[in-house]
Amino acid sequence: MSNPAVDINSDLGEGFGAWSMGDDRAVLAFVSSANVACGYHAGDPSIMRATVKLCAERGVSVGAHVSYPDLMGFGRRNMACTPDEVYDYCLYQIGALDAFCRASGVELKHVKPHGALYNQAACDGKLAEAIARAVKDAGEGIVLVGLAGAGFASAARSVGVRFAAEAFADRAYLKDGSLMPRSREGAVIHDAQLAARRAAQMVIRGTVAADDGSELQLRPDTICLHGDTKEAVDMAAAVRRALEDAGVRIRPIGEVRSV
């Protein structure tokens, strides 16, 4: 039996205009897929083009990081949008990034919701299905990335798109499998070695500890590391090293298990 494989993804291109966030170039040395902001929560046309070009140079798979239209709130504020609005927002952003991908000679491989859209769709089947429909209509073979154990998988099946289950090395979980709200202390993990151990446990054992000490069952196809934390580069390096030391093969989204 071959060693397990997993993708490592990071949210990149999250600056805007003269304002920059994170060290994308350094993070790209350790990840296999990038979720590129499409202008709704962060990013602008010039940053989108530059980020896609950098991914192409590094051989990192490119995906669209779609969001509610919320630049002021970095896409982390809940919005009361209809499924049709969510579909339109997602298809619009996917199409914009796909144009930059084509210009750089790379293929858009996946779509991942961001922030509040991600969290709301994880527990609202109609929103998840709207995102999945946008993925399907954007082009053949694009993979929907969503929270492992949430409603994204069934939404993807219902509309006939491929799905990749995602887990987070740098976020705390509640006992129901949802992510701990960022408003709570301890929601974001800043210890690179702890994040690395958690990532290896998720992939090798299929478990992770929740905030109450209980053990969650999950089998991720991709592990996320947020590019906007100050520890992002050290964390990406530590997670990749821990996974490879455990015999895990690092492969981009589209080349892993259930996708």
Image: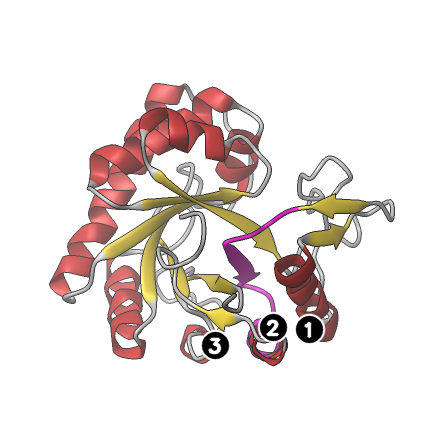
Q: Is residue 136 above or below residue 36?
A: above
- Assess whether mark 2 and mark 3 are in contact (beta carbons under 8 angstroms): yes
Secondary element at image label 1: helix
Nearer-N-terminus badge (3/2): 3
Bounds of the magenta span?
218-237
Would you name the residue on which mark 2 appears?
A: 239
Q: Is residue 103 above or below residue 233?
A: above
Q: Is residue 232 left or right of residue 133?
A: right
Secondary element at image label 3: loop
Report the amino acid beneath label 2: Val
> Residue 147: which disc?
none
> Residue 192: which disc?
1
Residue 174: horizontal and vertical position, in percent?
Answer: 75, 41
Q: Is residue 147 left or right of residue 64?
A: right
Magenta-drawn stretch contains 130: no
Would you name the residue on which mark 3 appears?
A: 30
Q: Is residue 169 left or right of residue 86?
A: right
- Assess whether mark 1 and mark 2 are in contact (beta carbons under 8 angstroms): yes
Magenta-drawn stretch contains 234: yes
